[in-house]
Every structure is written in structure tokens, then in C-alpha cells.
Image: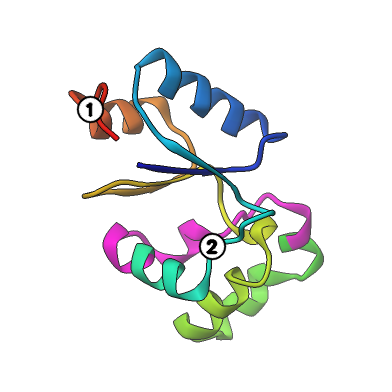
Amino acid sequence: MLFIHYPKCSTCQKAKKWLDENKIIYEERHIVESNPTYEELKTWYAQSGLPLKRFFNTSGMLYKEMKLKDKLQTMSEDEQLQLLATNGMLVKRPLVVADNVVITGFKESEWAEHFEGQEDHG
């Protein structure tokens, strides 16, 4: 399982602690040092079944500075994926990619549901 996060993000810290407490094995990846690529994002978006907007860090400063709330409505999905691939700070975090699930953000109840019985699996 891939755990993509920004170490200074308090939500990411909570998510990591939750994974550790639940003995779930994961591979860490720093979202800024190793930003998800266009190809990765395209695959994960398709796998997730989530609206593309859920992949954007809508509360982030960069999102607000770029006025993306208005711009995204006129951009194609492809253009949005290209944009996400330009800067990890635009991507909602933490981002978890496992065999059968892609989750953006951290909601303990949602994670518990997805990872029930996942202990000690990578």
C-alpha cells in the first residue's frame, strides 16, 4: 500500500498514526518531493470512482491563489490531471493507493471500513 503524504500536514500525521496503531504496513512517499505523475493520477482517478475534484487540495493556499474553484469548471478532466501533476501541494492528502482502493483525505470511519482485516498486509 502506498501512503502519499506531506509530513508537516496535521491530517497526514493523524492518518499515519492511525495506520501505525492499526499495524497496517505501507510505503511512504513525500507528496512534494515525489509528486504524483499524470499517469499515476489518471490511473488512481479511474480506480477510485471519486469525482476528480476530490483529488484537489481545495483548502490549500496554492489552490486559492490560483483561483481554481472557478477555473476547474471550465477545464477538461485531462487538463485538471495535468495541473495536479505539476505540484504536490495541489493534491489532496493524504492519498492512499492500495490494491483495490484509492482514498483521498483522512476520515477515520472511511479508513476503518476500507482497511478492516488489512493488518500486516502491504
Magenta stretch: give its range.
45-62
Tell me the tag on residue 36: 2
Q: Which mark is residue 118?
A: 1
Whether residue 100 is situated above or below residue 23 in the rendered picture: below
- The answer to whether residue 75 is left or right of residue 10 is left
Residue drawn at (45%, 67%) of the image: 41
Q: In the picture, which quadrant includes the C terminus?
A: top left
Residue 98 is a magenta residue = no
Question: Residue drawn 59% across and 57% down?
Answer: 91
Numbered disc 1: secondary structure: loop
Q: Position of residue 60 (x, y in %)?
A: 71, 52
* Residue 46 colored in magenta in the image: yes
Going by the image, does 28 lie left or right of 1? Answer: right
Tell which of 30 and 113 is nearer to you.
30
**Type of residue at label 1?**
Gln
How far apart in space, not on screen, are marks 2 and 1 (Cα)? 24 Å
In the rendered image, which quarter is residue 116 located in?
Answer: top left
* Residue found 81% across the figure and 64% down from its top: 65
Name the residue type under label 2: Pro
